[in-house]
Amino acid sequence: MTITTLLVANRGEIACRIFRTCRDLGITTVAVYSDADADALHVREADLAVRLPGAAPADTYLRGDLVVAAARAAGADAVHPGYGFLSENAAFAAAVQDAGLVWVGPPVKAIELMASKTRAKELMAGAGVPLLAPVDPATAGEGDLPLLLKAAAGGGGRGMRIVRELDALPGELLAAAAEAASAFGDGEVFAEPYVERGRHVEVQVMADAHDTVWALGTRDCSLQRRHQKVIEEAPAPGLDDALRTRLHEAAVAAARAVGYRGAGTVEFLVSAEGRPYFLEMNTRLQVEHPVTEAVFGLDLVALQLRVAEGEPLPSPEPPQPSGHAVEARLYAEDPARNWQPQTGALLTLEVPEGPGLRLDTGYTGGDTIGVHYDPMIAKVIAHAPTRTEAVRLLARALERARIHGPVTNRELLVRSLRHPDFAAARLDTGFYDRHLAELTAPAAGRDPATAALAATLADAVRGPDAVRGAEAVRAAEGGRGAEGGRGAPVAAPAPARFGAWRNVPSQPQRKRYRSEPDGTEHEVAYRTPRTGVPEPHETPGTRVLAAAPDHVTLEVDGVTRHFAVTAYADRVHVDATDAAYTFTALPRFTDPATHTAPGSLLAPMPGTVVRLAEGLAAGATVEAGQPLIWLEAMKMEHRILAPASGTLTALHAAPGHQVEVGALLAVVQEDPAATTPVPVPVPEETA
């Protein structure tokens, strides 16, 4: 059957990416959207769109019946599930086919066989795929530690726990089961040995209904946070030919064992000694599929559509790979604060374009990052002849990107790509456990005070009489034209229109800024002499070469530095050639209303209160570090901890409440006699 109209049962970046291929193939596209996504990019890019009433995923994108009804209403003849949501739901795949629609995915039976990780491992053992021996939690002993608890019915880090102490096992089992039940509707959890310093290596497979199965090389996805991937690359570096061959053969055997068709991924854990162990098979397209596309010169979505139409793959063997590709996931999150998700308006998103670079995103500047969905903004991919070149290209593209709005992990990505261990391909899943502190520390050689000075000087020249730079002033004095700070012709500055005199402050002007997100305050001073060009004050070795409302050029200790400056109300973004800074302009005097009572527990982000500690009520006694409130935001669950031992004097949170960032959840009055150390009240992530 030829597909003419395709509904994508997903949102965001993956929906936009599938639509791109459909446009190339002449296929009409249909989007579905929740109320929260009414103006989302994937809706704007689709030919047709159907509303799914509600905002939460459980009411919208996870409602297979509504999605099938939407496909019928729009006249679609096929459904592509993307990744996440219903992509590995066998009942949904069956419902699509029962409705007479083409399912762009594997057979229902293959999804069923791979849906449970425990059953999948049993099947893989029979196919000769190498496995880790399972551990029965009921009989586990000290010799079995450390253990990895995993949800049987899903992935993405939900329901996953590392257990290093036997006493912690019962509690972690309960917590993992509860999280798995909430995320996947199935609380089954299993245990297996946790491999220290293991690498996450996977093989992309593509199979048709004509007995052809391709193994499209390897990918390394070891750099992870919360058991979710951050940086991926193809091919996986540092594997010898024998190991690569074994991984390819095992992946093909896994696909054949379940009669697979379409795109899928077989994931392995490779020990430090080079032994591979089957983890799971993802019966869908992976987030990191672009690196495989780049290396093999393929469009995997186009191949998915081809296979779904019953056509064979183009050849018995896949094309030969070429070069190296690396992908970085740009998240709206703060790595320095326990990877805390961020929300709000994405004011600017500009990533450099050029040979070897690719951007996959579900956002554009002006969109809003909400609380209901994954915080990934975009994927940036670089492809080059060698790994070193691809890594360098990607790091520089991220460094030069202009991203204004919520805090992102952009700086972490750049530093990760340039870390000596990553450069030397010393990769394992504990990379961020070991290096996070140094990767999020203030960067040596970067001076936020200089960026704050640039912001101040740009701020100083805003308005209709903005001076375009020192060259413009000199040109005006000499009676001739000049080029401004960014190369645009400028006129001599007009005199201020205050009558017969001009007000030029003789005393230095001072402004205060708070660096975001670390909170460091900077006070900068400048003078505006009769030339009209602001001059730094109390900043030896710095002078202004050009100052415009959106661009400042400074000479700092003999080195010329350019700064692009963009202001949104009191928030100022400064983009330098090697760093990006965000500042909040502070008032001269502190507003007393901004203070909160000691012991106040504030919501660290917008979200939903999902539960409270048992028996929690005003008047209850709490211990320092005790989890009091569980908040869910952007598909992750966060614990709000008691900041001190004492008494809960107020409780404003209740299960089901929607709260905004900074909302007062509770107040704990510290007991001065308590001997329990008081921890820093930072929410602890549990997902």
Image: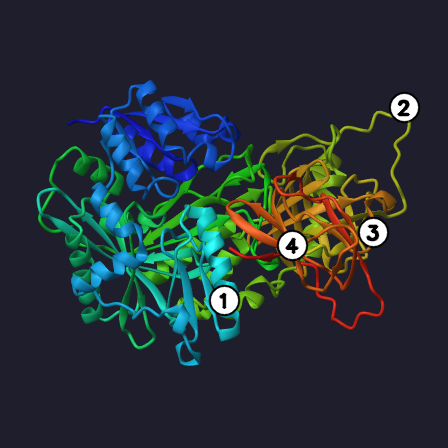
Q: Is residue 297 visible?
A: no
Tell me the colour scheme of the image.
rainbow
What residue is shown with label 2?
499
What residue is shown with label 3?
597
- Nearer to me, 305 or 644: 644
Identify residue type, mark 3: Ala
Answer with mark 1 or mark 3, whichever residue precedes in sequence: 1
The picture places residue 267, in percent across and down from the top left corner, at: 29, 59
What residue is shown with label 1?
170
Location of residue 198 with respect to 669 vertically, above or below: below
Identify residue type, mark 1: Pro
Answer with mark 4 or mark 1, whichever residue precedes in sequence: 1
Question: Given this view, does label 4 or label 3 mark the residue nearer the observer?
Answer: 4
Identify residue type, mark 4: Ala
Disc 2 vs disc 4: Cβ atoms closer than 8 Å?
no
Callout 3: 10 Å neighbours few (<14), some, many (20+)? Answer: few
* Quadrant housing the N terminus: top left
Task: Find the distance from the CA under tag 1 to the CA under tag 2.
Answer: 80 Å
Callout 4: 10 Å neighbours few (<14), some, many (20+)? Answer: few
What residue is shown with label 4?
613
The picture places residue 456, in percent across and down from the top left corner, at: 74, 45
Task: Find the distance from the CA under tag 2 to the CA under tag 4.
Answer: 68 Å
Answer with mark 2 or mark 4, whichever residue precedes in sequence: 2
